[in-house]
Image (cartoon, helix red, strand yellow):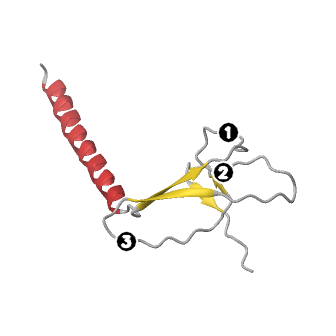
Amino acid sequence: MTKFKKFQLIFLAIFGVFMGGLATVKANAAAQNDIGYSVAAQLPKNQIDKRNSFFELKMKSGQTQTLHTKIFNVTNQEIKVKSAIHTAWTNSGGAIDYVNPTKT
């Protein structure tokens, strides 16, 4: 094996270890930002696409409907959750954006 090939192999090995270490650090940081609960929509019969995990309902103008969700506390501590309705979409970066609700 030539010296250049050995250098390439060593460089790739070090680079691979470095990149693997960065992935672990990023995963740990995400776990530390956990909010402590998750929410699941209880989809009604008029849900347009039942594969979605959000409410997308077929309704007539002026129609009202009560929506239900399940909140899962994944901690061993008591939590308080305040709910609100917001319009959301996925931006070009793949993150969820929310429309701020109108203050009344």
State the image coordinates of residue 20 (x, y, percent, origin top left).
25, 42
Q: Secondary structure at mark 1?
A: loop
Crowd tier of the residue under label 3, counting other residues whose Cα lies within 10 Å: few below 14, some 14–19, many 20 or above: few
Could you say whether the residue bearing mark 3 is in a helix, strand or loop?
loop
Residue at left 74%, top 58%? 65
Q: Mark 2 or mark 3, which is nearer the start of the sequence?
A: 2
Q: Which structural element holds mark 2?
A: loop
Above or below: residue 21 compared with residue 39: above
* Residue corresponding to mark 1: 49
Amino acid tagged 3: Glu
Q: Amino acid at mark 2?
A: Phe
Q: Which residue is mark 3?
A: 78
Give the quadrant of the C terminus.
Answer: bottom right
Instruction: Locate residue 66, reporting x and y percent.
Output: 69, 59
Q: Residue at x 29, y 55 (%)?
A: 28
Asked if the residue at tag 2 contacts the one at tag 3, i.e. Cβ–Cβ closer than 8 Å, the answer is no
Q: Which label number is shown at residue 55? A: 2
The amino acid at mark 1 is Asp
